[in-house]
Amino acid sequence: MRGPLKDVMRAAADLLFPVTCAACERLLDAGESGVICGRCLLGVRELPHPRCDRCGHPIGSYTCRWCPLLPAFVRAARSFCWIGAGTGGDIVHALKYGGWVRAAPAIAQRMQRVPWPRDVIEERTATVAVPLALSRLRERGFNQSVLLAGHLASAWGIPSWPDAIERTRATRSQTELTPAERLGNVAGAFRVSRPALSSIHGAHLILVDDVVTTGATLKACASALFASGARTISYMTFGRAPASGDRVIP
């Protein structure tokens, strides 16, 4: 009777405590697992092809707008979807601000689908997460970038170094600032932790964050890694804000 009894108890729990999608708050359909519904996952606007081999940005009839944002020591940058179109932003919001840490596996699974240049696949040493300010970490209780970096590392069969980078000072939220202000806000705000110094020497590291807008935070973290001995860095995010001139279907 264990099997039937378990099914009855599960059905009773679903009736009394129905599971809703963390992103849209609709009831999950029968058979759906996780905390994000299939409709929200299907509503994510994946970056279209063709894409630049280096920066991963969709290529139109114009000069690539993302490659100039990357320092020379950044090999490649990849993102799965647009932020500001579709449901990608809602899913990230559920993870970061709603505390739905169980959304991280579904997000990371989609990040894993993004293709990389062969040399990045062969060389990547470890994933490194963009750190949160201590005040935000205490308030939130977790770092969403650490969760994503851990899932990616497991899928790729490489280590994850969640504490490789640390903040040297508090910074304002980047969402409040202009692109020019973002660069100054995070310049010199990160350093490599002392225990990680020997590990990163000569490594090709995958720097992971949930969303990239101007790339200022990723650039500041990558600069700290490179200055401390990393050979090269690549960026990986779930979402990417459209650049000026991008045509994005809502």
Image (cartoon, helix red, strand yellow):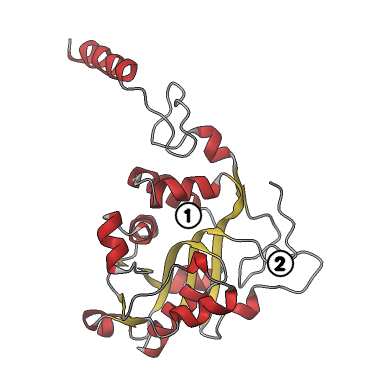
> Residue 219 location in percent, x, y?
49, 78
* Residue tagged 2: 244
Question: Which of the two residues, 29 or 141, is positioned nearer the viewer here?
Answer: 141
Question: Which of the two residues, 110 or 158, is positioned nearer the viewer here?
Answer: 110
Give the residue drawn at x 34%, y 43%.
102
Residue 80: which disc? none
> Residue 74 location in percent, x, y?
52, 79
Dot 1 crowding, Cα within 10 Å, few <14, some 14–19, many 20+: some
Question: Which of the two residues, 153 or 213, is positioned nearer the viewer here?
Answer: 213
- Give the quadrant of the N terminus: top left
Q: Is there a contact, CB below 8 Å, between mark 2 and mark 1?
A: no
Give the residue drawn at x 22%, y 15%.
3
The image quadrant of residue 129 is bottom left
Q: Is residue 9 above or below residue 164?
A: above
Q: Is residue 236 left or right of residue 53?
A: left
Distance between mark 2 and mark 1 Cα atoms: 27 Å
> Residue 89 location in percent, x, y?
53, 50
Q: Is residue 134 above or below residue 111?
A: below
Amino acid type shown at disc 2:
Ser
Give the residue drawn at x 33%, y 15%.
15
Dot 2 crowding, Cα within 10 Å, few <14, some 14–19, many 20+: few
Tag 1's secondary structure? helix
Q: Is residue 91 left or right of residue 154?
A: right
Q: Is residue 177 visible?
A: yes
> Residue 32 location in percent, x, y?
43, 28
Amino acid type shown at disc 1:
Gln
Tell which circle, 2 or 1, labels the residue nearer the N-terminal end: 1
In the orientation shown, which residue stands out farthest toward the left? 1
The image quadrant of residue 191 is bottom left
* Residue tagged 1: 112
Q: Is residue 10 above or below residue 81?
A: above
Tag 2's secondary structure? loop
